[in-house]
Image (cartoon, rainbow, N blue to C red):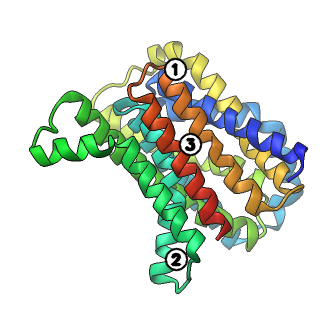
């Protein structure tokens, strides 16, 4: 990979980790998810309209069905991610979410689709599992759980962070399969898939918010006043990293671009340790490094 695409991927990874840091600090919920979707739809409307005018007229039932399905899966992913950030640490949720998705994909492919991994791939899986264990607390956590002393607040927060991180990774794997099929086999423009998928998320989120409002009034006006700055940043910036990676993929092999993105896990772990004061930053950073190395090995196998 030459300097230009590598620079684009590294900057994209930093942007991705940065908007996740903002989402974590905001403590946002379903209202925040809808707010960022509205911002994205407005800010990126010129790009969406241009690509829609150019490509959308040729789409049939398959393409529109994939766009709607992608939007629904992305909505579930985003809501689970935000929930994970409210109950867990950034340096736990983010690496587990990013690292578990390729692990789950590889396990499904080898178990049910008849695919085989070389030694490098199994070493990659070992690195991901080791990294997950390190982020989860390493031997000390295992000893405390065996001894039955795993009920303190810190351990409960760690458990919830792991659960939501792994669940987020599952949905990342889901949308990766759907989006990959849409782009590679159904001829959907990646940028249009992202923009129209965002528009499809909005009715789903409105339905979720209406259901939540029936149970407990949400106070949307005050929430908008409180959250408009982080929502504006996340809604504006979050598509940028995706576009930069797509552009890098036109100049370098995807097999090199995709693994390089995982450096975002290291950025997120550093942010969690230094900017949010999350504990055990050294061990979690090493765990994130193991996951990133494992993902790179897995994608090269």
The reply to whether residue 82 is in sight is no
State the residue position of label 1. Answer: 274
Query: Eyeballing the image, is 108 above or below 42?
Result: below
185 left or right, relative to 203? right
Of the residues under marks 3 and 1, which one precedes in the sequence? 3
Query: Please, which residue is most extreme toward the bottom here?
Result: 114
Location of residue 121 in the rendering, given as x and y in whole percent from the top left corner = 57, 70
Residue closest to the eye, 193 or 3: 3
Location of residue 264 in the rendering, given as x and y in whole percent from the top left corner = 62, 40
The dot on residue 109 is 2
Location of residue 255 in the rendering, given as x and y in whole percent from the top left corner = 74, 63
Q: Secondary structure at mark 3?
A: helix
Contact between marks 3 and 1 (CB within 8 A): the answer is no
Check disc 2: other Cα within 10 Å, few if <14, some if 14-19, many if 20+: some
Check disc 3: other Cα within 10 Å, few if <14, some if 14-19, many if 20+: many
Residue at position x 25%, y 29% from top?
A: 154
Query: Please, which residue is most extreme toward the left here?
Result: 148
Label 3 or label 1, whichever lies nearer to me, is: 1
Q: CA distance from mark 1 to mark 2?
A: 37 Å
Residue at position x 67%, y 70% from top?
A: 181
Q: How many marks?
A: 3
State the residue position of label 3. Answer: 202
The reply to whether residue 289 is in sight is yes
């Amino acid at each position: 990979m030459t300097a230009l695409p590598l620079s684009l991927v590294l900057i994209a990874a930093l942007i991705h980790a940065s908007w996740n840091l903002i989402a974590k600090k905001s403590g946002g919920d379903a209202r925040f998810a809808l707010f960022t979707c509205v911002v994205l739809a407005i800010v990126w409307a010129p790009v969406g309209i241009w690509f829609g005018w150019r490509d959308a007229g040729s789409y049939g039932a398959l393409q529109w069905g994939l766009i709607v399905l992608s939007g629904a899966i992305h909505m579930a992913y985003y809501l689970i991610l935000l929930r994970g950030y409210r109950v867990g640490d950034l340096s736990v949720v983010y690496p587990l979410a990013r690292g578990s998705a390729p692990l789950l994909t590889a396990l499904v492919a080898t178990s049910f689709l008849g695919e085989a991994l070389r030694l490098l791939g199994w070493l990659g899986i070992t690195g991901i599992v080791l990294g997950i264990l390190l982020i989860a607390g390493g031997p000390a956590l295992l000893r405390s759980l065996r001894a039955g002393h795993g009920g303190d607040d810190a351990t409960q927060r760690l458990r919830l962070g792991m659960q939501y991180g792994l669940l987020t990774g599952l949905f990342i794997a889901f949308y990766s399969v759907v989006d990959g099929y849409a782009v590679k086999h159904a001829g959907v423009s990646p940028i249009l898939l992202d923009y129209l998928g965002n528009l499809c998320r909005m009715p789903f989120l409105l339905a979720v918010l209406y259901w939540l409002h029936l149970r407990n009034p949400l106070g949307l006006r005050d929430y908008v006043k409180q959250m408009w700055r982080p929502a504006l940043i996340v809604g504006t910036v979050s598509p940028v990293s995706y576009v930069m990676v797509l552009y890098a993929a036109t100049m370098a092999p995807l097999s090199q671009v995709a693994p390089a993105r995982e450096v975002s896990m290291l950025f997120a772990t550093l942010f969690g340790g230094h900017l949010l004061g999350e504990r055990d930053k050294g061990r979690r950073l090493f765990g994130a490094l193991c996951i990133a190395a494992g993902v790179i090995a897995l994608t090269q196998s």
